[in-house]
Amino acid sequence: MAIARLHGGPLDGQVLPLEDENQDRLIMPYSETQIVYERAGVAENTGEGDGPTSADFHFVEAEDDIDPDPDGRDE
């Protein structure tokens, strides 16, 4: 199993499991839209005893505007 380290966007700093360590894009639901992250660089920690394989993914876009307060509760 591999992990994705997310950079930028609404999930900045999150770590998610990757089922396929060769995956180049992550498209995930977020609120009422979808967000896209793309791999940046090569996988790290690919050896036997150096922990889980990990890859950095950087925020690319959201399909719609992300509104953190869509119903006005925070006013």
Image: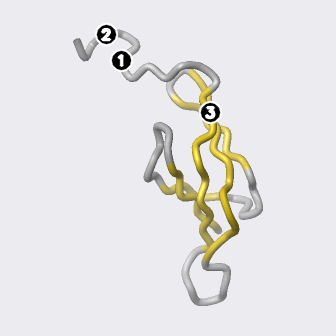
Asked if residue 22 lies left or right of residue 51, the reply is right
Please state the horizontal and vertical placement of residue 14, each as a whole percent of the image: 46, 52
* Residue at screen point 72% across, 47% down: 25
Q: Which image quarter: residue 18?
A: bottom right
Instruction: Give the class, few, some or many, for how many residues have Cα within 10 Å of label 3's Cα (few <14, many ≥20).
Output: some
Residue type highlighted by circle 2: Gly
Residue type highlighted by circle 1: Asp
Which mark is in front, 3 or 1? 3
Q: Quarter of the image for the N terminus: give it.
A: bottom right
Asked if residue 22 lies left or right of residue 70, the reply is right
Q: Nearer the viewer, residue 59 or 49?
A: 59
Residue under pointer 2: 72
Q: Are marks 3 and 2 in contact (CB under 8 Å)?
A: no
Residue under pointer 1: 69
* Residue at screen point 46% across, 37% down: 10
Q: Quarter of the image for the C terminus: give it.
A: top left
- On screen, 74 above or below 23? above
| Dot label at residue 61 | 3
Secondary structure of the residue carrying numbered label 3: strand
| Residue farthest toward the left in the current orientation of the protein | 75
Mark 3 or mark 1: name the one nearer the start of the chain.
Answer: 3
Q: Which image quarter: residue 63?
A: top right
Secondary structure of the residue carrying numbered label 2: loop
Q: Nearer the viewer, residue 47 or 56?
A: 56
Distance from Cα at disc 3 to Cα at disc 2: 24 Å
Please state the horizontal and vertical placement of residue 6, each as a whole percent of the image: 53, 52
Asked if residue 14 lies left or right of residue 54, the reply is left
